[in-house]
Image (cartoon, helix red, strand yellow):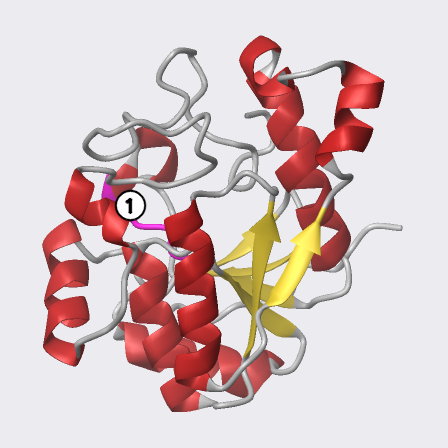
């Protein structure tokens, strides 16, 4: 059955704080922040929990995140007195039994599909909206992102409060507020994913560096 696309407000001139406040007032508890523990999520966690201490946050646990990411996950839960929902696909053993070992080397798109896109799709099917840390200057694929838009791929409202923020804007907020952030950023990892598919590099150039892949499929249908 087709999902009715709602009429959405134009919040392009609104601050990130105001976008977050509108989203939570409109959709909570059927909205959740997708947290990948990058610096953008450090900002959004701060804004969201200031707006509503009961806000929902989820993370896609692929079982192969960096240890620094898992440690930040634990610190985040303690700081905000919250439990981040763990959205998870099949175990690595199940994946290996069906598709062979080290699928990420042979077919990174299929690996992302199994470990990230499938559990995301299942989880989002139970929500009315989701919040992301997408910024327009991160990549050409994200340049057209709006602060509030309809997500055709998953059939719900997508909220991108930091869409017009620069890298400098993000760091300014993180440092001004003394927010915890992933220490891998200090080691020249600008974008952080699974440890076997992430290398040091600016922007998103360190993601899937040995392949033509630029997105895992969470933010575009045909990635």
Check the image and name the residue furthest to the right. Answer: 1
Query: Is residue 136 shown in magenta?
Result: yes
Question: Looking at the image, which residue is at 46% across and 30% down?
Answer: 215
Q: Position of residue 96 (x, y in %)?
A: 76, 22
Question: Looking at the image, which residue is at 46% across and 63% down?
Answer: 73
> Can residue 125 be seen in the rendering of this structure?
yes
Q: Position of residue 19 (x, y in %)?
A: 38, 75
Please state if 167 lies on the left or on the right of 65 as rendered.
Answer: left
Q: Position of residue 92 (x, y in %)?
A: 71, 33
Between 84 and 56, the one lying in front of the other is 84
Q: Position of residue 83 (x, y in %)?
A: 58, 76
Q: How many marks?
A: 1
> Can residue 19 be seen in the rendering of this structure?
no
Tell me the residue that label 1 is attached to: 136
Between 109 and 29, the one lying in front of the other is 109
Q: 4 above or below 57? A: above
Instruction: Please identify the dominant SS of the magenta region.
Output: loop
| Boundaries of the magenta span | 133-137
Tag 1 secondary structure? helix
Q: 120 above or below 30? A: above
Figure quadrant of the C terminus: top right
Q: 33 above or below 103? A: below
Question: Looking at the image, which residue is at 59% across and 25% down?
Answer: 222
Please state if 150 lies on the left or on the right of 117 as rendered.
Answer: left
Query: Is residue 219 shown in magenta?
Result: no
Question: Looking at the image, which residue is at 84% across and 20% down?
Answer: 98
């Amino acid at each position: 059955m087709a999902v009715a696309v709602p009429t959405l407000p134009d919040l392009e001139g609104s601050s990130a704080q105001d976008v977050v406040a509108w989203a939570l007032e409109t959709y909570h508890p059927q909205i959740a922040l997708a947290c990948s523990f990058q610096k953008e999520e450090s900002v959004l966690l701060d804004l969201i929990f200031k707006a509503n201490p009961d806000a929902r946050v989820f993370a896609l646990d692929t079982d192969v995140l960096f240890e620094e990411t898992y440690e930040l996950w634990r610190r985040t839960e303690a700081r905000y007195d919250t439990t981040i929902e763990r959205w998870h696909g099949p175990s690595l053993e199940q994946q290996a039994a069906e598709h062979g070992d080290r699928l990420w080397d042979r077919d990174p798109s299929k690996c992302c599909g199994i470990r990230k896109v499938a559990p995301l799709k299942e989880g989002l099917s139970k929500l009315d909206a989701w919040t992301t840390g997408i910024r327009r200057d991160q990549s050409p694929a994200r340049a057209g992102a709006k602060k509030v838009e309809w997500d055709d791929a998953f059939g719900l409202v997508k909220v991108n409060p930091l869409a017009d923020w620069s890298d400098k804007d993000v760091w300014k907020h993180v440092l001004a507020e003394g927010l915890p952030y992933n220490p891998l950023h200090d080691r020249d990892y600008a974008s952080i994913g699974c440890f076997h598919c992430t290398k040091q590099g600016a922007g998103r150039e360190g993601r899937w560096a040995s392949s033509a892949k630029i997105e895992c499929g969470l933010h575009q249908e045909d990635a």
